[in-house]
Image (spheres, rainbow, N blue to C red):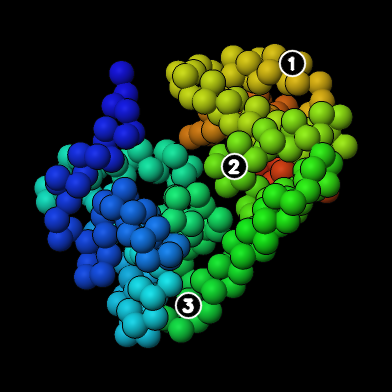
Amino acid sequence: MKTPIIAVLSAVALAASSLAAEGWLVDFEKAKAQAAAEKKDLLLDFTGSDWCSWCIRLRKEVFEEEAFKKVAPGQFILVELDFPQDTSKQPEAVRKQNEALREAFGIEGYPSIVLADASGRPYAQTGYQKGGGLAYLKHLDELRGKVKLRDASFKRAEGAAGLEKAKALQEGLAELPEGLVAAHYKSTLQEIRALDPADTLGMDAKFGAMEALRLLGGLLKSKQEAGGEAVRSEVDRFLTGHPKFGPRQKQQALMEVLKFLMPPRDNRVALKLMEDVKALDPASEEGKVAEQIRARVEKMLAK
Protein backbone atom coordinates (compact mmCIF):
# COMPACT_ATOMS: atom_id res chain seq x y z
CA MET A 1 0.00 0.00 0.00
CA LYS A 2 1.31 3.45 -0.90
CA THR A 3 1.97 5.83 1.97
CA PRO A 4 -0.64 8.64 1.88
CA ILE A 5 0.90 11.82 0.48
CA ILE A 6 -0.28 13.87 3.46
CA ALA A 7 1.56 11.57 5.86
CA VAL A 8 4.66 11.73 3.67
CA LEU A 9 4.63 15.50 3.48
CA SER A 10 4.05 16.00 7.20
CA ALA A 11 7.06 13.82 7.98
CA VAL A 12 9.33 16.04 5.92
CA ALA A 13 9.17 18.86 8.43
CA LEU A 14 10.96 16.61 10.91
CA ALA A 15 13.59 15.44 8.44
CA ALA A 16 14.40 18.53 6.37
CA SER A 17 17.27 20.65 7.51
CA SER A 18 19.79 22.58 5.42
CA LEU A 19 19.61 20.15 2.50
CA ALA A 20 19.08 22.71 -0.24
CA ALA A 21 21.10 25.75 -1.20
CA GLU A 22 20.76 28.97 0.72
CA GLY A 23 17.36 30.56 0.20
CA TRP A 24 15.73 27.33 -0.95
CA LEU A 25 13.35 25.12 1.02
CA VAL A 26 12.88 21.37 0.72
CA ASP A 27 9.64 21.08 2.71
CA PHE A 28 6.70 21.57 0.32
CA GLU A 29 4.07 22.13 3.01
CA LYS A 30 6.24 24.68 4.78
CA ALA A 31 6.85 26.40 1.45
CA LYS A 32 3.11 26.64 0.75
CA ALA A 33 2.44 28.10 4.19
CA GLN A 34 5.20 30.68 3.71
CA ALA A 35 3.94 31.52 0.22
CA ALA A 36 0.44 32.14 1.58
CA ALA A 37 1.75 34.28 4.44
CA GLU A 38 3.99 36.36 2.16
CA LYS A 39 1.54 36.41 -0.80
CA LYS A 40 4.09 34.90 -3.17
CA ASP A 41 4.09 32.13 -5.75
CA LEU A 42 6.09 28.90 -5.58
CA LEU A 43 9.01 28.01 -7.82
CA LEU A 44 9.58 24.26 -7.70
CA ASP A 45 12.90 22.97 -9.03
CA PHE A 46 12.73 19.26 -9.85
CA THR A 47 16.42 18.47 -10.20
CA GLY A 48 19.08 15.79 -10.18
CA SER A 49 21.74 17.80 -8.38
CA ASP A 50 24.66 15.37 -8.67
CA TRP A 51 24.10 13.78 -12.09
CA CYS A 52 21.92 15.95 -14.37
CA SER A 53 24.23 18.19 -16.43
CA TRP A 54 21.48 20.60 -17.46
CA CYS A 55 20.31 20.88 -13.85
CA ILE A 56 23.84 21.74 -12.76
CA ARG A 57 24.13 24.32 -15.54
CA LEU A 58 20.80 25.90 -14.57
CA ARG A 59 21.91 26.23 -10.96
CA LYS A 60 25.32 27.66 -11.82
CA GLU A 61 24.24 29.93 -14.67
CA VAL A 62 20.97 31.15 -13.14
CA PHE A 63 20.13 30.24 -9.56
CA GLU A 64 23.58 31.06 -8.17
CA GLU A 65 23.86 34.32 -10.11
CA GLU A 66 23.58 37.44 -7.95
CA ALA A 67 20.82 38.99 -10.07
CA PHE A 68 18.60 35.96 -9.56
CA LYS A 69 19.45 35.61 -5.86
CA LYS A 70 18.54 39.25 -5.31
CA VAL A 71 15.24 39.37 -7.20
CA ALA A 72 13.67 35.89 -7.23
CA PRO A 73 13.08 35.53 -3.45
CA GLY A 74 10.96 38.68 -3.58
CA GLN A 75 8.63 37.00 -6.09
CA PHE A 76 8.76 33.30 -5.21
CA ILE A 77 9.25 30.87 -2.40
CA LEU A 78 12.01 28.71 -3.86
CA VAL A 79 11.70 24.95 -3.40
CA GLU A 80 14.30 22.35 -4.36
CA LEU A 81 12.93 18.86 -5.04
CA ASP A 82 16.06 16.83 -5.57
CA PHE A 83 16.52 13.32 -7.02
CA PRO A 84 20.25 12.71 -6.47
CA GLN A 85 22.10 9.50 -7.22
CA ASP A 86 23.80 9.76 -3.83
CA THR A 87 20.90 9.75 -1.37
CA SER A 88 23.04 9.22 1.74
CA LYS A 89 22.44 12.78 2.96
CA GLN A 90 18.77 12.93 1.98
CA PRO A 91 16.30 11.79 4.68
CA GLU A 92 13.82 9.12 3.66
CA ALA A 93 10.89 11.47 4.34
CA VAL A 94 12.27 13.97 1.85
CA ARG A 95 12.79 11.26 -0.77
CA LYS A 96 9.22 10.06 -0.32
CA GLN A 97 7.87 13.61 -0.51
CA ASN A 98 9.79 14.28 -3.72
CA GLU A 99 8.63 11.03 -5.31
CA ALA A 100 5.02 11.85 -4.45
CA LEU A 101 5.35 15.34 -5.91
CA ARG A 102 7.06 14.04 -9.04
CA GLU A 103 4.07 11.78 -9.64
CA ALA A 104 1.54 14.47 -8.74
CA PHE A 105 3.08 16.99 -11.15
CA GLY A 106 3.77 14.45 -13.90
CA ILE A 107 7.49 15.22 -14.08
CA GLU A 108 9.26 13.21 -16.78
CA GLY A 109 12.55 15.06 -17.25
CA TYR A 110 15.08 17.22 -15.44
CA PRO A 111 15.40 20.03 -14.77
CA SER A 112 11.68 20.79 -14.60
CA ILE A 113 10.71 24.14 -13.15
CA VAL A 114 7.08 24.41 -12.07
CA LEU A 115 5.48 27.70 -11.08
CA ALA A 116 2.48 27.40 -8.78
CA ASP A 117 0.30 29.66 -6.68
CA ALA A 118 0.47 29.57 -2.88
CA SER A 119 -2.03 26.70 -2.75
CA GLY A 120 0.31 24.57 -4.86
CA ARG A 121 -1.82 24.75 -8.00
CA PRO A 122 0.57 25.03 -10.97
CA TYR A 123 0.20 27.50 -13.81
CA ALA A 124 3.41 27.15 -15.82
CA GLN A 125 6.27 24.74 -16.45
CA THR A 126 9.67 25.37 -17.96
CA GLY A 127 13.26 24.16 -17.73
CA TYR A 128 16.76 25.26 -18.62
CA GLN A 129 17.02 28.56 -20.49
CA LYS A 130 20.30 30.06 -21.59
CA GLY A 131 21.19 33.69 -21.00
CA GLY A 132 21.85 33.87 -17.27
CA GLY A 133 19.92 35.20 -14.31
CA LEU A 134 18.40 38.37 -15.77
CA ALA A 135 17.14 36.57 -18.88
CA TYR A 136 15.64 33.83 -16.74
CA LEU A 137 13.90 36.35 -14.49
CA LYS A 138 12.36 37.93 -17.59
CA HIS A 139 11.23 34.48 -18.74
CA LEU A 140 9.65 33.79 -15.35
CA ASP A 141 7.93 37.18 -15.38
CA GLU A 142 6.33 36.31 -18.72
CA LEU A 143 5.07 33.05 -17.25
CA ARG A 144 3.71 34.86 -14.20
CA GLY A 145 1.61 36.94 -16.58
CA LYS A 146 -0.36 33.79 -17.33
CA VAL A 147 -1.58 33.39 -13.77
CA LYS A 148 -2.70 37.03 -13.72
CA LEU A 149 -4.83 36.39 -16.80
CA ARG A 150 -6.12 33.16 -15.24
CA ASP A 151 -7.14 34.93 -12.07
CA ALA A 152 -8.76 37.82 -13.94
CA SER A 153 -10.92 35.37 -15.89
CA PHE A 154 -11.79 33.39 -12.76
CA LYS A 155 -12.74 36.64 -11.02
CA ARG A 156 -15.01 37.53 -13.93
CA ALA A 157 -16.63 34.10 -13.63
CA GLU A 158 -17.66 34.87 -10.05
CA GLY A 159 -20.08 37.50 -11.31
CA ALA A 160 -21.49 35.40 -14.14
CA ALA A 161 -23.84 32.45 -14.45
CA GLY A 162 -24.59 29.59 -16.82
CA LEU A 163 -22.74 29.45 -20.11
CA GLU A 164 -21.21 32.91 -19.58
CA LYS A 165 -19.59 31.67 -16.39
CA ALA A 166 -18.37 28.55 -18.19
CA LYS A 167 -16.83 30.75 -20.92
CA ALA A 168 -15.01 32.88 -18.34
CA LEU A 169 -13.61 29.77 -16.67
CA GLN A 170 -12.61 28.39 -20.07
CA GLU A 171 -10.75 31.60 -20.89
CA GLY A 172 -8.85 31.33 -17.62
CA LEU A 173 -7.82 27.76 -18.33
CA ALA A 174 -6.81 28.66 -21.89
CA GLU A 175 -3.88 30.63 -20.44
CA LEU A 176 -2.37 27.46 -18.93
CA PRO A 177 -0.60 24.39 -20.36
CA GLU A 178 -3.18 21.74 -21.17
CA GLY A 179 -1.35 19.03 -19.26
CA LEU A 180 -1.40 21.06 -16.07
CA VAL A 181 -5.10 21.85 -16.56
CA ALA A 182 -5.97 18.17 -17.00
CA ALA A 183 -4.07 17.14 -13.88
CA HIS A 184 -4.64 20.03 -11.47
CA TYR A 185 -7.84 21.85 -12.45
CA LYS A 186 -10.31 18.98 -12.30
CA SER A 187 -12.74 20.85 -10.06
CA THR A 188 -12.84 23.74 -12.53
CA LEU A 189 -13.38 21.33 -15.41
CA GLN A 190 -16.20 19.68 -13.48
CA GLU A 191 -17.80 23.08 -12.89
CA ILE A 192 -17.62 23.88 -16.61
CA ARG A 193 -19.15 20.49 -17.38
CA ALA A 194 -22.06 21.24 -15.03
CA LEU A 195 -22.55 24.73 -16.50
CA ASP A 196 -22.31 23.47 -20.09
CA PRO A 197 -23.90 19.99 -20.13
CA ALA A 198 -24.25 20.07 -23.94
CA ASP A 199 -20.48 20.69 -24.17
CA THR A 200 -20.94 23.57 -26.58
CA LEU A 201 -17.48 24.85 -25.58
CA GLY A 202 -15.88 21.46 -26.29
CA MET A 203 -14.09 21.33 -22.95
CA ASP A 204 -15.54 18.00 -21.89
CA ALA A 205 -14.53 16.36 -25.16
CA LYS A 206 -11.03 17.86 -25.06
CA PHE A 207 -10.09 17.19 -21.47
CA GLY A 208 -12.15 14.03 -21.21
CA ALA A 209 -9.92 12.64 -23.93
CA MET A 210 -6.79 13.75 -22.08
CA GLU A 211 -7.98 12.08 -18.89
CA ALA A 212 -8.79 8.91 -20.81
CA LEU A 213 -5.30 8.88 -22.33
CA ARG A 214 -3.79 9.33 -18.87
CA LEU A 215 -5.77 6.34 -17.62
CA LEU A 216 -4.61 4.37 -20.65
CA GLY A 217 -0.99 5.11 -19.74
CA GLY A 218 -1.62 3.75 -16.25
CA LEU A 219 -3.28 0.66 -17.67
CA LEU A 220 -0.37 -0.08 -19.97
CA LYS A 221 2.15 0.32 -17.16
CA SER A 222 0.58 -2.73 -15.58
CA LYS A 223 1.49 -4.71 -18.69
CA GLN A 224 5.22 -4.05 -18.73
CA GLU A 225 6.00 -7.65 -19.66
CA ALA A 226 3.43 -7.87 -22.43
CA GLY A 227 4.55 -8.09 -26.04
CA GLY A 228 3.81 -5.45 -28.65
CA GLU A 229 0.88 -7.34 -30.16
CA ALA A 230 -0.81 -7.82 -26.77
CA VAL A 231 -0.41 -4.14 -25.90
CA ARG A 232 -1.68 -3.10 -29.33
CA SER A 233 -4.79 -5.23 -28.78
CA GLU A 234 -5.33 -3.51 -25.42
CA VAL A 235 -5.13 -0.08 -27.05
CA ASP A 236 -7.53 -1.13 -29.84
CA ARG A 237 -10.07 -2.22 -27.21
CA PHE A 238 -9.57 1.09 -25.45
CA LEU A 239 -10.23 3.06 -28.63
CA THR A 240 -13.39 1.05 -29.32
CA GLY A 241 -14.69 2.27 -25.97
CA HIS A 242 -13.98 5.92 -26.85
CA PRO A 243 -15.80 6.54 -30.15
CA LYS A 244 -15.60 10.34 -29.71
CA PHE A 245 -11.82 10.34 -29.98
CA GLY A 246 -10.55 12.40 -32.90
CA PRO A 247 -7.56 11.46 -35.09
CA ARG A 248 -5.01 13.11 -32.81
CA GLN A 249 -6.26 11.35 -29.66
CA LYS A 250 -6.20 8.04 -31.54
CA GLN A 251 -2.65 8.75 -32.70
CA GLN A 252 -1.56 9.55 -29.15
CA ALA A 253 -3.12 6.35 -27.87
CA LEU A 254 -1.43 4.24 -30.55
CA MET A 255 1.93 5.88 -29.90
CA GLU A 256 1.75 4.57 -26.33
CA VAL A 257 2.38 1.10 -27.80
CA LEU A 258 5.75 2.29 -29.11
CA LYS A 259 7.13 2.38 -25.55
CA PHE A 260 6.69 -1.40 -25.39
CA LEU A 261 8.64 -1.95 -28.59
CA MET A 262 11.86 -0.39 -27.30
CA PRO A 263 14.63 -1.40 -27.38
CA PRO A 264 13.98 -2.43 -30.97
CA ARG A 265 11.88 -5.61 -31.07
CA ASP A 266 8.65 -6.66 -32.75
CA ASN A 267 9.68 -4.67 -35.81
CA ARG A 268 6.74 -5.82 -37.93
CA VAL A 269 4.33 -4.77 -35.18
CA ALA A 270 6.09 -1.39 -35.03
CA LEU A 271 5.85 -0.99 -38.81
CA LYS A 272 2.10 -1.66 -38.84
CA LEU A 273 1.64 0.61 -35.84
CA MET A 274 3.44 3.53 -37.50
CA GLU A 275 1.49 3.03 -40.74
CA ASP A 276 -1.75 3.24 -38.78
CA VAL A 277 -0.63 6.36 -36.88
CA LYS A 278 0.39 8.13 -40.09
CA ALA A 279 -2.86 7.17 -41.86
CA LEU A 280 -4.94 8.95 -39.22
CA ASP A 281 -3.31 12.33 -39.91
CA PRO A 282 -0.02 12.48 -41.87
CA ALA A 283 0.38 16.23 -41.24
CA SER A 284 0.22 16.07 -37.44
CA GLU A 285 3.33 15.94 -35.25
CA GLU A 286 2.53 12.33 -34.38
CA GLY A 287 2.05 11.53 -38.08
CA LYS A 288 5.43 13.01 -38.99
CA VAL A 289 7.20 11.15 -36.18
CA ALA A 290 5.46 7.93 -37.22
CA GLU A 291 6.72 8.34 -40.80
CA GLN A 292 10.30 8.83 -39.60
CA ILE A 293 10.12 5.72 -37.44
CA ARG A 294 8.39 3.73 -40.20
CA ALA A 295 11.23 4.54 -42.62
CA ARG A 296 13.85 3.39 -40.10
CA VAL A 297 11.98 0.18 -39.37
CA GLU A 298 11.70 -0.61 -43.09
CA LYS A 299 15.47 -0.26 -43.44
CA MET A 300 15.98 -2.63 -40.53
CA LEU A 301 13.65 -5.22 -42.02
CA ALA A 302 15.34 -4.94 -45.41
CA LYS A 303 18.72 -6.00 -44.00
Q: In the rendered image, which residue does mark 2 sit on?
A: 185
Element marked by disc 2: loop
Asked if the residue at tag 1 contacts the one at tag 2, i.e. Cβ–Cβ closer than 8 Å, the answer is no
Q: Position of residue 157 (x, y in %)?
A: 73, 50
Q: Please state which amino acid type lies under the numbered disc 1.
A: Gly
Identify the mark nearer the N-term, 2 or 1.
2
Image x and y of residue 233, in percent? 66, 15
Q: Amino acid at mark 2?
A: Tyr
**Residue 230, position in %: x, y?**
59, 14
Query: Alpha-carbon neighbours of circle 1 within 10 Å: few (<14), some, or many (≥20)?
Result: few
Inter-mark Cα distance, 3 to 2: 26 Å
Is disc 2 surrounded by few (<14), some (14 to 19) or many (20+) residues within 10 Å? some
Residue with the mark numbered 1: 241
Disc nearer the start of the sequence (3/2): 3
Asked whether, in this view, residue 212 is left or right of residue 13, the answer is: right
The spot of residue 125 in percent (x, y) is 52, 58
What's the distance in space between the residues labelled 2 and 1, CA to CA? 25 Å
- The front one of 223 and 154 is 154
Which quarter of the rendered picture does the C terminus lie within? top right
Q: Is label 3 or label 2 in front?
A: 2
Q: Which residue is mark 3?
A: 137
**Quadrant the N terminus occupies:** top left
User: Residue 168: in sight, yes or no?
Assistant: yes
At x 70%, y 14%, the residue is: 237
Taking the spot 78% from the left edge, 48% from the top edge, the residue there is: 160
Res 78 → quadrant: bottom left
Disc 3 is placed on an element classified as helix
Q: Quadrant of residue 49?
A: bottom left
Q: Observer-nearest residue: 67 or 4?
A: 4
Q: Is residue 288 visible?
A: no
The image shows residue 197, relative to residue 129, as above or below, that is above
